[in-house]
Image: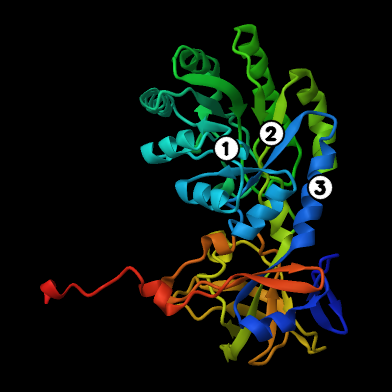
Amino acid sequence: MKLFNSDYFTYKDNQLYCEDVNLKSITDKVGTPVYIYSKIFFEDRYKKFNSAFAEIDHTIFFAVKSNFNLNVIKIFSDLGSGIDVNSEGELLRALEAGVSTDKIILTGVGKTKHEIKLGLENKVKFIKTESVEEIYLINKIAEELNVVAPLAIRINPDVDPKTHPYISTGLAENKFGIDSSKAVNVFTEASKLNNLKLVGIDMHIGSQITELSPFVEAVTKLANIFIELKSKDINLTHFDIGGGMGVVYNEESPFTPDKLAQALLPILKPLNCNVSFEPGRYLTANGGVLLTEVLYTKMNHDKNFMIVDASMTDLLRPSLYGAYHHIQPVMLNNGEDIVADVVGPVCESGDFLAKGREISKCEAGNKLAVMSAGAYGMVMALNYNGRRRPPEVIVDKDKFYIARSRETYEHLLYDEKIIHELF
């Protein structure tokens, strides 16, 4: 079987390490399943993205929907990143991590009145809106609070991002943003409202995008709208192209931030404004692994199964849209390779981490590493079947820190009680 190695996760003496920490030492401490993140990976990825666009005024907003661990948020905030939040819960997590409110942007296609109010009361950098009705609601709430709401409007450029349909967000058929053909009229209408200050135009066409052409097409469309707005005296200070840069899970060949900059800078420089980015997966995915233990192995009708203690409740992506995560032993055993389904203990046929995967033959008790699990892993974890969500551990050079402990059964029961009047 092939091995997924990097500067951050590599084998030493046949044992898998994160930075300078033997992963076995972590499982000895906290058990499995467990998420493990490399701090140095996060830092290096941010710096690489940041330096690529050094020629222009720009801001990176880490998309916390990809990984909302408080310490991960703080790592990026300490590097100078802004924070992109999509809900009250994500906003509160950013505040708990110590992020300054003027570095937070509030996004989301369906913000509640309470979330909008909370964003305004906390004086976030700006709120992004995705519908005309929401524009009027934000204006009304701002009037009630006697404030002026800084507003960016998300446009749907109707560009095919050439990614999985479940993570495509920039086509006309998707729920996100305002029709690009109506953008100028919507901006003009919004500019007449007394409690709004139009500050930006925004897009986000999808996730796990591995080709440059969709970005070039969408940014060109958005830039033309930006220029037309300027001719109508609607002068915006922010041009937000969102996130979506793809990463390597299997055999993808995604472009680098330098290549993205090379393609986009000729379009962005003439705009003479702050350009914003909202990467999430790019900054975190390959900086994390999910470790799991083999519970049993068996064969049904010539088909091999490895039953592990991690499941769809820990990592939903494979079950949700067939996402690929490479799986390899924590300790190399030089065993023969077999083809097997790696499945969890949950009572669903859709509970799998891999199907028909070539993998080193394992025995009960062996540990496996599910790679590229730093994004859309723990944030999507569930309690189905009464399962506890796993702990999260951050590695920094030769030390590791438990950033979140494993849930207890008391956690699962804390807000429930028997209503005796019913019985």
Residue 59: % across, % down: 71, 36
Q: Which mark is residue 276?
A: 2
The residue pinned by badge 3 equals 47
The residue pinned by badge 1 equals 105
Between the residue at mark 3 and the residue at mark 2, the CA separation in whole angstroms equals: 15 Å
Amino acid found under the numbered disc labelled 1: Ile
Return the residue nearer the eye: 106 or 160.
106
Q: Please report whichever mark, 1 or 3, sits nearer to the chain's N-terminal start.
A: 3
Q: Note whether 2 is above or below 237 in the view shown.
A: below
Residue 107: % across, % down: 53, 38
Q: Secondary structure at mark 3?
A: helix
Query: Mark 3 and 2 residues: CB-CB less than 8 Å, in contact?
Result: no
Amino acid found under the numbered disc labelled 2: Ser
Is any part of residue 402 visible from this angle?
Answer: yes
Q: Residues within 10 Å of mark 1 (few under 14, many from 20)?
A: many
Q: Secondary structure at mark 1?
A: strand
Query: Mark 1 and 3 residues: CB-CB less than 8 Å, in contact?
Result: no
